[in-house]
Image: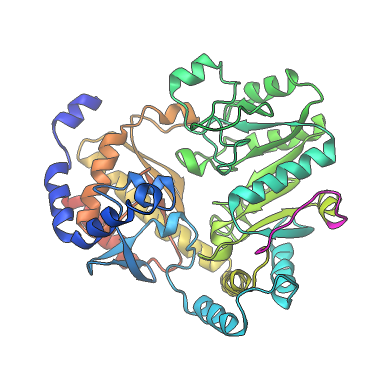
Amino acid sequence: MTSLLHSRDIFSPSEREASVRHKTPGSLARYERAQRSLAGGVSSGLRRDARPYPLYFKSGAGSQIEDVDGNTYRDFTLAWGPLILGHAPARVTAAVAEQAARGFTFGAQHDLEIDVAERLTSIIPCADSVSFANSGTEIVQVALRLARAATGRAKFIKFEGHYHGWSDTVLVSYHPALSQCDESNGMMAMPVGAGQLVSTSAVIAEWNNRSSVERAFAENPGEISALICEPILCNSGCIYPEERFLEFLREITAQSGALLIFDEVITGFRVSLGGAQELFGVTPDLATYAKAVGAGTPLSVLAGKREFMDLIATGRVVHAGTLNGNPLSLAAANAALEELQAGSPDIYSRLTATGERLRLGLERILRERGLPAVTNGRGAVFQVSFCDRHPRTYRDTLAADRKLYSDFALALLDEGILALPDGRWYLSTAHTDADVDATLEAAARI
């Protein structure tokens, strides 16, 4: 299937690349310049995957973004997810500007810490209290440290394909090849890049596979401190948990004396106001947040039950950081959460409906062209893949034709539609029916 599709050049990649290059000389010049002083020419390695090269942007408003050459795009990347209200939402920009005039950071306490903490504990089901940091990577490390302290155990379970930041302990078995999965028998933690310490604490299980979870606990009796997962596998195909799978995880962790941690860095404030735990009605012991909670500013949150969070409150578990709870990020979060709270549940109903019209429309258009296209996820975050069936585990995603999707994204870029290179699509409350119409029309043209 794959070679046949490639041989037909379905989306005319050569012509599309030439067209995009013609439109974006300023981005190319900047990228070439950046590579002389900035490692790889980008500030995050995943951005290197953009075709034909990383674009440079100068402004965004609502659902649209403008590059340095003056081209505008309907943006479905949303900075890899944080922009739940779109680019430069008025309430958030005003709050940040007002705070910036009073001071960027204090390294001390201020009222916004209390305001945002109270909002979060009123919204998040598992949140008796919260702690602040600046990135998803670091807040996951706090959660795992807390789990070790609470249980006196060193190991934790994670799933193939799930992403919990780039720290050595958790950046394992993220996107292993099928041969690596088979070689490790699905249980060994596979490092992603050079220089990583060998993880002796991570035990690997397969998403939506109960027996693999039971095996992980059985083979490590009394050693598992926590099970951490994306409650919707957004980083590898937007794969939903199968019926009662999250309930199963809640039950087996409780029986085993381990903590259940939901990594809601993507799902938090995106799939519903209370995130995936509200959507599915399953309450974890701890949950981590980033991306949408800061509405585009650097902010992460650990939320959890008091019996565990008190370990931080009393200083038994160390949690520190110069910029933790900085006023600029909390001003943005306070304004964004206020808007989301005020508009919920209607704001989420509209967001889901808009996303579903786009998701199903793209799937229909691609299938009408005879392409093996499927979409996973729902509403505000979903995945477009070129494969024959909907994946239920990470390993199923390996059957997707990534080259064909890359060609599709490049063709959309030429049509003024900005999409992520990995097949994930994000929507914001700023996206309208007109955005969906224009995007579907572009997809039908290419």
Q: Where is residue 28 drawn, in percent x and y?
A: 23, 56
Instruction: Give percent across and percent down for residue 319.
Output: 75, 54
At 57% from the left edge and 85% from the top edge, which residue is drawn? 101
Q: What's the magenta bit mostly, secondary-structure-wise? A: loop
Q: Is residue 404 left or right of residue 128?
A: left
Residue 271 magenta: no
Question: Which is nearer the eye, 237 or 324?
Answer: 324
Image quadrant where residue 87 sits = bottom left
Residue beneath the point at 46% across and 45% down: 377
**Is residue 135 in view?**
yes
Vertical side of 418 occupied by 13: above or below: above
Quarter occupied by the N terminus: top left
Q: How is the image coloured?
A: rainbow
Q: Position of residue 285 (x, y in %)?
A: 76, 46
Task: Decide which of 64, 140 is in the foreground and name it.
Answer: 140
Q: Is residue 147 left or right of residue 210?
A: right
Q: What are the residue bounds of the magenta stretch?
A: 313-323
